[in-house]
Image (spheres, helix red, strand yellow):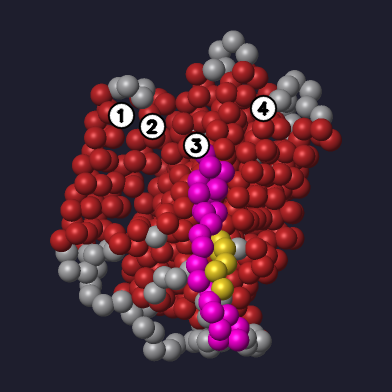
Amino acid sequence: MPHSSPDERWDARLWAALTVLSAVVFLDALDVSMVGVALPSIQADLGLSTSALQWVVSGYVLGYGGLLLLGGRTADLLGRRRVFLAALAVFAVASLLGGVVNDGTLLIAARFVKGVSAAFTAPAALSIITTTFAEGPSRNRALSVFTAAGASGFSLGLVISGFLTQLGWRWTFLMPVPVAVIALVAALRYLPRREEERAEGGHDLIGAVTITASMLLLVFTVVQAPEAGWGSLRTIGSLAGVVALLAAFVVTERRVRHPLVRLGILRSGPIVRANLGLVILFGSYVGFQFVAMQYFQNFLHWSALATALAFLPAGLLVAVTSTKMGDLADRFGTGRLIVVGSAALAGGYAFFLRVNADPDLVTLVIPGMVLLGIAFALSFPSLNIQATNGVADDEQGLASGLLNTSGQVGGAVVLAVVTAVLTSNTSADPLDGFRAAITVSAILGLVGLAIALTGLRRTRTAVPAADGGTPDERVLETV
């Protein structure tokens, strides 16, 4: 695959490669949210219980979030192109199966397999970009396009689902099939074989098993906790198991010769802030989205299409503006963009704390959605840039895997918490439950803003004068 230099104009082949990678991450993100509007139809058609229905969503998140680190490391070890192509082929087959099965268990299994395949395509695609485009303006520009595709897929998923569900819920599963097949054919052409630099060593099997098991168990525990009870022996025992597995992982990574995760990567403040930022951005929005579905459809009795259109302002804003984020990151720095995005996120949730039995589109729904769209447009690309800048090529898969894992696991954990708050506060007045659940997302938005502000520390440093004279002491931003 061709490489770009910092000042090089991209040729048609580079653009084609970036388009293919962006199309695939669009599909990965689309699948996270697109099933939301279709859930009532799936439940009625397949006769699923409420507890079984949640696994249509959780199955994908379990496969995606639980195996992302392994996917990133595998891409580093076996070759990014090879892993990307194989996982994309599995994604297409699983999408087809999900659209034709007539059994709830098989549908959940197909969703899990799709999540697993996304866990390999997403970090492979991101690491292909970061090792192809030179760090700086060229990479920032490529990442802004790539992350705009992911943010647009997630933001527009509900809108697209609203239209497709009018035709039948199966179309929400079948629609990605031809797109995935076209992307696979294009990838074979525009991601040609070349000698790739690969990470040394083999798979850290013990590390892979312990970290994957801990993520799977954590997501499973928080999803089941509202039903089993947060104080139940099963929940407490499962959380203790998560802690034990994480401890075993840390011990393993410190002792093995070629660890799955080099723990030293977490000494970077920008990388840690980026991962925490995505936990909050993605997690709070997934929780809000679930509450909004209950509010619009079950309480206000809006149709699936009307509910989807309520999210259109946010989705369109992300799709239209995210491609410009690379230029803004070059000019203002990722730290400032994340701060503004975090403020918009908290502000958007604050608007929806005023939910009532007759919401006004002009003063409540549209302004809130616009702010959430601004938050995603600014924060999502900036967090991806911040999480991968300064990382060696042989660890790009690890860095991208960490970031994506943060988002997916954050989404599952926050969704479980929001669901518990919603169900425990709706006995007297459903609106009280909606407000309490949205408050969780609003608080997380404020926490994200506080974390982002720590990235704007200002330090003084000596900068050599242009004429070679006395160094000039200037204030530089650390982001």
Sequence-first tag of 4 and 3: 4
Percent x, y of residue 383: 54, 58
- Residue 70 picture quarter: bottom left
Asked whether the beta carbons under mark 1 and mark 2 sit within 8 Å of each other, the answer is yes
Percent x, y of residue 364: 77, 32
Element under disc 3? helix
- Nearer to us of marks 4 and 1 is 4
Is 479 rendered above or below residue 170?
Answer: below
Which residue type carries mark 2? Gln
- Nearer to us of marks 2 and 3 is 3
Q: Residue at x 53, y 87 (%)?
A: 3
Tell me the distance, in whole angstroms, between the alpha carbons under discs 4 and 1: 30 Å
Near mark 1 (Cα within 10 A), the count class, few <14, some 14-19 or many ≥20, is many
Q: Which residue is mark 1?
A: 235
Image disc number at residue 224? 2
Q: Which residue is mark 3?
A: 415
- Residue 116 picture quarter: bottom left
Element under disc 4? loop
Membership of 50 in magenta stretch: no
Element under disc 2? helix
Region of the chain picked out in magenta, as a range: 447-471
Near mark 3 (Cα within 10 A), the count class, few <14, some 14-19 or many ≥20, is many
Sequence-first tag of 2 and 3: 2
Q: Would you say residue 318 is visible in this rendering?
A: yes
